[in-house]
Image (spheres, rainbow, N blue to C red):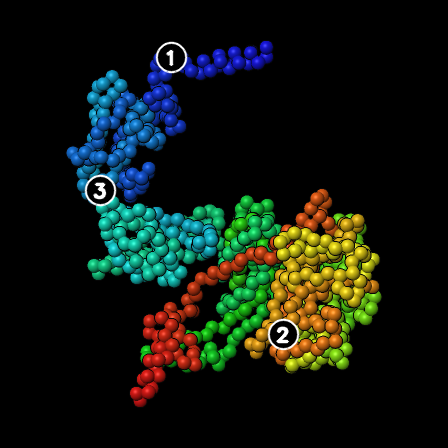
Amino acid sequence: MRKFKLTLFLSIVAGLCAFPSGATAAESAAAKDLHPRPSGYNEAGAPAEKKELRFQAIEVLGKLPYDLIAQFPKDTTPAFDVKRVTLNGAEQADFLVENRGIVEGHKRVHGAEDFTVSLLANWQTNKSYEVVVEGTGDAGQAVRVSVTQDSPATRAAVKSTSFGSPTVEFPYHHMIVVLAKEVLEPGKVTLVELDGKKSRDVRFFNSGKPHPAKADKAGAAEGESYEGKLDGARDFRIVLSVNWTNGSKHEVQVKVTTDAGKENVYKAEGTAPGTGGRWNVDWPHATYLVLHETAGLLREGEPVHVSLGFFADDIKKPENEIRVVTFDSTSPKAGADGYVIAPSQIKSVTVWRDERLLNSDERDAETKELVHRYDATTSVELLFLADVQPYQEKIYQVVYGNPKAEAVRAQTDLKVTPGGGMSQTVENRDYRFFLSTNSGSVEQITILGDGEPVLLEHKLESNGAVHWNPDIYSPPTPWVHASDWEKPVFDQISGPLMHRTRRYSPLPHMDSVTANVTYEFYPGKPYVVMSSFMEVGKDLFVQALRNSEIVFNHATLNEFVWEDALGKIQSLKIETARKHPIHALEIPARTPWMAFINREQGVGFANIMLACENGNRYGQPPSETQPYFYVQNGPWIYWARPNVYPFGGLNFTRMMPVRAGSFYYEKNAWVPFRLAKGDEPFRDLERTQKLLTHPLLVHEWMATDDRTPEKWVMPILTVPFDEGVAGAVSGHKKQSEETKK
């Protein structure tokens, strides 16, 4: 019954809607079939537009180009079908009919709305034009309307002027000037000036469809012209770097020499929008960085390392002056101006200012002009935290040049507590690492985060460290490890965004074998990045040469898991595995990730491989014997990567060569973690692995400075050669000339 009442109600409503007051069913049906009410229908009582011709640049709608629009007011004609349009007496085959801005494909005028007829006139200045529109009304009567008007005395050469914030294609603040194809002649740009000063960062594009009257003269396909050539048939788009601020005014002047030898000058003026301009005028200089996310992962507080070179005279105190900003008005971190200030940290500053070279009197051999080869440079190694959406390309600006700026220190969860000797404790929300007093190696790890802290350690033998390698065993010299160091060369970089320790020294009792180990800790990240490098200075014979060793006792961790070559997660129960000295397990040297875990406690410690390279500085083949990872189950549990390891085989008495110059490099991420809930306990670990192995791609853009020579400077070469640059002297030419002498 309820269904019947609802159906009846909807039927009645539909009927009322179908028959407006005062209209019969037949009339309504006819109106609906002929011209359904368009979205642009005039409001009742709205004033009509005036009758006029609108002369404009060529536009294209529905593949139909037009540059002349005949506009007619509503209620001056009945509804009719357009049959014929003439321009100055010439019938037009192609034209568009629009009712109040809505294209009418059947070329029907509704009558109750303003309507326009658009066509291609290729109009000329100072000329009279008449458009006549003829058709047939619903009753069969003839309908004729016309409009006559003179074209403008001049035609605007500048089609449009606009401003842009940094984009991927133009990663800098810029201004866009479009010159109209209707007035252009083929030629070449000889000069672009911005606010009366030559602009050196300009790009040129022949854009859009060619002018119908010039189509046969169009040059190559539309697109960028690296030489600034205009084909004269298309609009010419000019994009130039402009440090615009909100509401600033700018003037551009473009000089073009036509193919016929005439010089034309085009001027454009524009006012910048109210948002998106330069961050702060007190910071006059900027280097732009395009970050590209390629793994489909959300990056929040992602550490980004860059090395930038600035003109030394533009920056006095990088530690105080540098800011990293991005215009992202949708971010909850954005200020009222739409900008987000990213946390940043200076890692190092190096200034090059060799006065002897800067003031050298080097002259061009032919022109005798002074060669400008050097500029004083301040190089900065910078770290900042970026927020980037999956697959996004985002622009960050490194701004500087404000000598009055004061240093700003970010507040993070990264905490460093010094101890005695080289010992220190480093922690964030996810972990706590304790580094040993004598060697600085990792001695204890505590898993923090949600839940009770869980301690992971070794402390069963020798130095008791968790991290041992690199190591080498060349008997009769004792087996030595980096964890056996006694006060190696040590330095650190410590700040709110990164704490980095570096140790370097020959391995104990092995003066010909040097190694270095670095640890990098970050705020808000579950991982620590470890890298090590070992180099052998002279020929040796060894029974073991390894890296990547991590050792724990049996107190907590009881299972080993890893991702195999097919991307599947495999598992090994430690307590039931083969015992030392036999390897419990051997897996490939480039295993993506591995971990010791305890499922009952829901914790683990993982190693994510980021890089592994063996080589030889003298060009010899790497000294390695089928590297691999192995797991060992003894009084302790550990994994290690042997690069040369006869000691680990059944015939462990063999001595194998390691050539002088051999080196062994690795870079890994360590992750003390808690297993994820549900059926995918390693979900978070796998995400971290994907994130670290697909770092953000970084591209730098810096404006051309006035101090940089406009002409390319030939580099200093042992034997000059032709680099394809005009005026360059090839080595063959120079040698042949000297031979003639």
Name the residue type under label 2: Ser
Which type of secondary structure does the marked residue at label 3 adopt? loop
User: Which amino acid lies under the numbered mark 1 shown in the image of this protein?
Assistant: Ala
Task: Name the N-terminal-most of marks 2 and 3.
Answer: 3
* Closer to us: 663 or 265: 663
11 is higher (above) or lower (below) than 442: above
CA distance for labels 1 and 2: 94 Å
Q: Which residue is mark 2?
A: 623
- Mark 2 → mark 3, Cα distance in angstroms: 79 Å
Residue sitting at 76 percent across and 52 percent down? Answer: 603
Q: Position of residue 268 (x, y in %)?
A: 33, 52
Residue neighbourhood size for the residue with mark 3, other residues' Cα within 10 Å, grouped as few (<14), some (14–19), many (≥20):
some
Q: Quadrant of residue 528?
A: bottom right
- Residue occupying image coordinates x 37% and y 79%: 731
Q: Which of labels 1 and 2 is toward the front?
A: 2
Residue type, numbered disc 3: Trp
Q: Which mark is residue 123?
A: 3
In this image, 62 relative to 3: left or right? left
Q: Is residue 235 above or below residue 517?
A: above
Residue identified by numbered label 1: 25
Q: Nearer the viewer, mark 2 or mark 3?
A: 2
Dot 1 or dot 2: first in sequence order is: 1
Residue 411 can be seen in this image: no
Query: How far across and down, in percent of the image, does residue 248 sit?
Result: 43, 51
The answer to whether the residue labelled 1 contacts the one labelled 3, judged by CB atoms less than 8 Å apart, is no
Q: Is residue 104 above or below residue 263?
A: above
Under tag 2, what secondary structure? loop
